[in-house]
Structures are given as structure tokens and as C-alpha cells.
């Protein structure tokens, strides 16, 4: 990871949740000059101690012990989605900033409660995904802002997968409330779209479940509580309309994960927003071939934790951070609206809005 020099002091971080996703945070955060992991915790204290030993973290133990530790300034919350708000509320009430894995909460109302509590305790809340800060999506953002494809009018999103039970060691929660392809992968795509096009105004959708159960390679059955194939139409405040499909019911497809945006003067194709890098392709009205755009910022590798570091820099500078709770709340509200629109068979307005994040290059 390429890190520029900076004079910003390190912020002391405690990580709660030492499951599969934690490894990349433990790997990246010490390489970012703003961040220092001083403690980790998990409901399984043994797992926390194993993580601490593996990654050279000074202290490990229970969640309660971490929350009362005055040496921790900021909590990175990597628990399962159903625990995000409970852990976040406990952290902000302990006077600590919080950066949560996606989604921010299971419902918009719960997410809003977390924001209100944070404001009352004068601490910040941030949320993954931070992939929109990466080189690919920031290059696409710059091209849009420069008018490379004219006025964005429409777009298409595809996230087509056979489901996580084929690779994940503990896939059950992906099929419980707060899971499914929309709540699991939707935050990457919707956050990217808000970064590119601005907030979503309204949504309509159809959602289905391919099967009442899923089966792991070992033969264990998992009950399905959520839609596993979601087709949505998103109307953006700026005027563009995007069709989006999120699925765990597609055995195979020739359609790559990604985003296409169609403007008055051309088309822009963006990489899978679950990644930080490229490629980014563009093609104007009169062009006969696609052009692969050179990436304009340094964050092209797996830089999870970049949003934490950018949040720390923003706290130190007294400005708004980009992977903000208001952005995450709007994305959550959009997902909740998509599900509600599918259930009711209606076009529904998205209740929240947010400020389109400022472009990001480096610290």
C-alpha cells in the first residue's frame, strides 16, 4: 500500500469483531499513518486473542473491556449486520468514534438512532464501503465531473452470483434479515452510484426468492428469510434513471459485475465497486473503440480501512468525512425502499437524502 507522508497524529483504534473480514483491516490499518490498532475484541475471546497474536495487536479480550478502555479513541465495528447498531450505540455512549462495516443498520430508523446518539455524545460515525474512495471510482467520478459522457441519463448495474454458501465458511447470515444480495452487495453499488450521480429520489422493484433453503457443499441446509433476486429501477435527484439487478440465484453469467452509465455524449463503464481499482472504460458517440482510462489516484489495491483513515484525517482537520453516516443512512434507506417497493408493488420515494461526497485523491 502506497502511503504519502503526513503530520496527522495516529488515532488509537479498537476493532470489535475478529471474523473473516477483519484480516484485511488488521493488515491495512497499521500501514496508514493516521491509524494505530491498540486493541481487538470478539464475543469469542479466544478468537480475539488469536487475531492479536497473528497481527501484533497489543491487547485483546471482551467487547465490554474494549468499550471501557480509555486508550481506544475509535471503534471499527466488524460484527455481523444484526449487531451493528447495538455495538455502535455502546461505543458512542462510551465517547468513542465509530466506523462500521456495511450496512450501517438493518433499518433506517435504527441507523438514525445511532446518528442521533453520536451527535449527542459529540463523536463521529462512519461506515463502509470505502471502495468508492478507490482509484477506479474516483477516476470515473472525475470523468463525469469533466463532462466526458455529457449529461448522465441512464445506467445499468449487475451483481449476479450463485450465492455465498459456495465459498463462505459461515454463510447463514447472508440469508437472514439484513442479508440477501441487496443488503450484502447493494451498499457497494449504491454508494458508488451516489458518489457518481448524487442521491436517489425514488425506487420501484420486484424481488423473489429462488428457493426456501440453500445447501452448503457439505450438505447442510440454510433457511432463506430474504429475497435472493432483486430487480430495481432507481430514479436519481439529478435526473438519471438506473436499472439494477442484485442476485444470489444466477448459476453463471457472461455479464460482469459492474456499473454502466449512459450519457448524452457517451458511455462510461466502471469496474466492480467491491474493488478499489479499475478498469474504467469510456466510449464517445463517434468512437469505434473503447478507451481504458488511466487511473488518476493511488488507491487501486485492496485498501479496506481507507475510509477509517480518511475519517481520522477529517476529524483532525475539523471537516466532514466522506464515508459518512449520512451517506450510509441514505444508502440503507434506498435499500429499504427497494424492498418495500417490491413488497407493495409501488414506486416509492426515498425518505432521506445526502450530500454527494467530495472527490478524493489522497490525504
Image: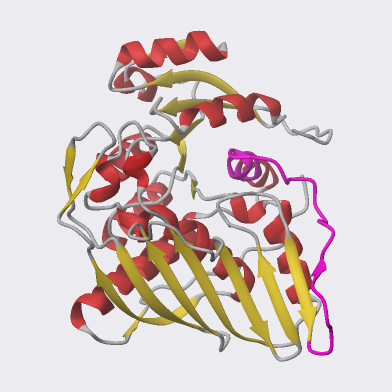
Q: Is residue 360 above or below residue 201?
A: above
Looking at the rendering, which quadrant does residue 350 occupy? Answer: bottom left
Q: Is residue 90 left or right of residue 24?
A: left
Magenta stretch mostly in which secondary structure?
A: loop
Q: How many marks?
A: 0
**Residue 242 percent location from the top left of the image:** 51, 80
**135 to 230, vertically: above or below:** above
Residue 32 image point, x, y percent: 69, 31
Residue 124, percent from left and from top: 49, 46
The image position of residue 314, as x and y in percent, is 65, 47
Q: How is the image coloured?
A: secondary structure
User: Could you tell me which residue is drawn at 78 percent across and 53 percent down?
Assistant: 361
Q: Is residue 311 visible?
A: yes
Instruction: Work out which quarter of the rendered image holds the N terminus and state it.
Output: top right
Looking at the image, which is closer to me, 213 or 143?
213
- Does 139 sit left or right of 121 as displayed? right
The residue sitting at 16% across, 40% down in the picture is 221
Identify the residue shown where x is 58% and y is 68%.
259
In the rendered structure, does residue 308 fall within the stretch colored magenta? yes
> In the drawing, does residue 347 fall left or right of residue 146?
left
Nearest the viewer among 344 and 313 is 344
The residue stretch that appears in magenta: 285-311
Q: Is residue 320 visible?
A: no
Frontmost residue, 315 versus 139: 139
Front in this rendered view, residue 107 or 299: 299
Amino acid at each position: 500500500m502506497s502511503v504519502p507522508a503526513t503530520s496527522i497524529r495516529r488515532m488509537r483504534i479498537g476493532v470489535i469483531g475478529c471474523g473473516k473480514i477483519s484480516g484485511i483491516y488488521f493488515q491495512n490499518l497499521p500501514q496508514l499513518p493516521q491509524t494505530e490498532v491498540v486493541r481487538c475484541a470478539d464475543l469469542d475471546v479466544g478468537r480475539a486473542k488469536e487475531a492479536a497474536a497473528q497481527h501484533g495487536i497489543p491487547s485483546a479480550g471482551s467487547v465490554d473491556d474494549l468499550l471501557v478502555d480509555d486508550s481506544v479513541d475509535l471503534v471499527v465495528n466488524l460484527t455481523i449486520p444484526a449487531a451493528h447498531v447495538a455495538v455502535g450505540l455502546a461505543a458512542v455512549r462510551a465517547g468513542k468514534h465509530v466506523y462500521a462495516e456495511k450496512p450501517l443498520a438493518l433499518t433506517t430508523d435504527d441507523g438514525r438512532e445511532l446518528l442521533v446518539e453520536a451527535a449527542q455524545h459529540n463523536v463521529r460515525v462512519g461506515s463502509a464501503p470505502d471502495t468508492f474512495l478507490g482509484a477506479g471510482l474516483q477516476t470515473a467520478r472525475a470523468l463525469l465531473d469533466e463532462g466526458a459522457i455529457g449529461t448522465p441519463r441512464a445506467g445499468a448495474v449487475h451483481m449476479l452470483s450463485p450465492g455465498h454458501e459456495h465459498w463462505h465458511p459461515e454463510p447463514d447470515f447472508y440469508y437472514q434479515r439484513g442479508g440477501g444480495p441487496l443488503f450484502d452487495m447493494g451498499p457497494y453499488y449504491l454508494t458508488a452510484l451516489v458518489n457518481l450521480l448524487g442521491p436517489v429520489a425514488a425506487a420501484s422493484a420486484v424481488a423473489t426468492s429462488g428457493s426456501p433453503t440453500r445447501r452448503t457443499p457439505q450438505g447442510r441446509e440454510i433457511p432463506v428469510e430474504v429475497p435472493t433476486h432483486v430487480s430495481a429501477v432507481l430514479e436519481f435527484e439529478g435526473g438519471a434513471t438506473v436499472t439494477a439487478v442484485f442476485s444470489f440465484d444466477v448459476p453463471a453469467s457472461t455479464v460482469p459485475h459492474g456499473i454502466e452509465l449512459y450519457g448524452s455524449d457517451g458511455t462510461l463503464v466502471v469496474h466492480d465497486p467491491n474493488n478499489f481499482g479499475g478498469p474504467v472504460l469510456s466510449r464517445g458517440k463517434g468512437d469505434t473503440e473503447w478507451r481504458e482510462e488511466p487511473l488518476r489516484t493511488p488507491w487501486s489495491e485492496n485498501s479496506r480501512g481507507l475510509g477509517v483513515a480518511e475519517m481520522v484525517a477529517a476529524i483532525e482537520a475539523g471537516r466532514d468525512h466522506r464515508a459518512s453516516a449520512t451517506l450510509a443512512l441514505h444508502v440503507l434507506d434506498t435499500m429499504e425502499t427497494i424492498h418495500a417497493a417490491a413488497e407493495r408493488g409501488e414506486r416509492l420515494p426515498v425518505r432521506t437524502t445526502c450530500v454527494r461526497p467530495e472527490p478524493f485523491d489522497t490525504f
